[in-house]
Amino acid sequence: MNEKPYLPRLIDRKMTQYLQAFGAVCIEGPKWSGKTRTSLHHCKSSFYVGSSRGNFSNRKLALMDPSLILEGNSPRLIDEWQEVPSIWDAVRHEIDLRGGKGHFILTGSSTPNNRGVFHSGAGRIAKLRMRPMSLFEMGCSSGSVSLRGIFSGDTSAKITGEIDLRRIIQFIIRGGWPENIDVDYEFAQLLPKQYLEAVVNSDINRIDGRTRNLDKIRLLLRSLARNESTTATNRALKRDIKEIDDEDIDVETVAEYLNLFDRLFLLDNQQPFSTNIRSSVRVKQSDKRHFSDPSLACALLGTTEEVLLSDLETLGFLFEALCERDLKIYAEANEAKLFHYQDYHDNEIDAVVEMPDGNWGAFEIKLGAHQLDDAAEKLLHIKSVIESEPKGRPPKILGVICGLSNATYIRPDGVHVIPITALKD
């Protein structure tokens, strides 16, 4: 059977750069996001720690002497290294012995306990975060609008084509999983559900060998899904579980389980932006909550096309999650970062992209084109508030990322209109 052709990922460029700059690259991220496939594209030999062949002989060999598995052409892929944490130190030591760059690629779908890892690998092993695929990587965005181009002054207007609301909903429910690209939509909804089952029934307890209350884990996951794209606190999650599911969970347990979800790359929260605005306005410091892919929230909520068409509020939050997943991928491809903004005067910005030179853009995310005027007015107001501060540094770019717009252009007030199905890095 012929192997599927490799679909390029935006992280490829960084992989190539990092292999020239470091002794090893560790690519981390959620299961099924394409880490191994991308690593195979860049490596010249490979070793699968978790392979079941020979009664899991690979894992036994790695446990016996990690240095034995490092022999092979460089870059050598060590897949799922966290199964035997001592591999990390063996790789670091081997890099010191060899000198030079680009010897190893490590992949990991969970972060092990510090126990068994004695050296950070700083200066030798660089880490990269892989996420599920963006719409552009999946071929669902034309890529006619570039995030980099917006910041560099590309102001050309373009017709980007009509997009159906049901199509947007399918993007959300299907998710950015590489194995879902060619699967009929009817069956593509199954993958996120199976992903969650694998995490809850296997990975949660395997990560450190402790047995946990899986019912409470499921309660917390459902609460996170109900609070997708919000800044709900741990206490708010506890209250939500009590009010909706009529169950109690300790705040300490919430914190413990959230840490586990982070270690499994199940979550991908959006940090608050404040440090470079240079404004005296007090800024809230809460993360905006996201799963690593909005399809996971859909699976937990049991959403369908028809359900979301009748619940536009939930659809709005999930669409925001889709856009912010893609924005994070596009930003990081440009060495930029994605944040959100909230202050104590009820001013909010859905997405803040800060470029490496310190310039930043403020973006609102709206599903319908009829919301453009309100979104633009909001952005212009926040810009004026920051400009009024003695040392305030306003955004360079104002933009509305839209689901149902058929064109990209700059409004007379200077606000960019950007269809998500036309955006790329």
Image (cartoon, grey):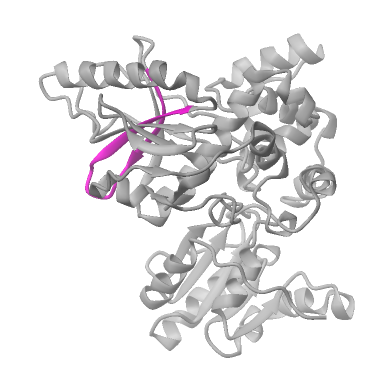
Residue lying at the far right of the rendered structure: 55
Q: Quadrant of residue 210?
A: top right
Which residue appears at 50% of the width and 40% of the height? 420
Is 30 on the left-hand or right-hand side of 333? right
Which residue appears at 74% of the width and 17% of the height? 241
Per the rendered image, the range of residues in magenta is: 348-365
Which residue appears at 23% of the width and 41% of the height? 359
The N terminus sits in image quarter: bottom right
Q: Is residue 340 above or below residue 151?
A: above
x, y percent for residue 254: 66, 27
Which residue appears at 66% of the width and 74% of the height? 5
Q: Is residue 235 above or below residue 130?
A: above
The prevailing secondary structure element of the residues shown in magenta is strand
Q: Nearer the viewer, residue 81 or 45?
A: 45
Q: Is residue 197 above or below residue 410?
A: below
Asked if the magenta segment contains residue 361, the reply would be yes
Q: Nearer the viewer, residue 58 or 346?
A: 346
x, y percent for residue 334: 36, 55
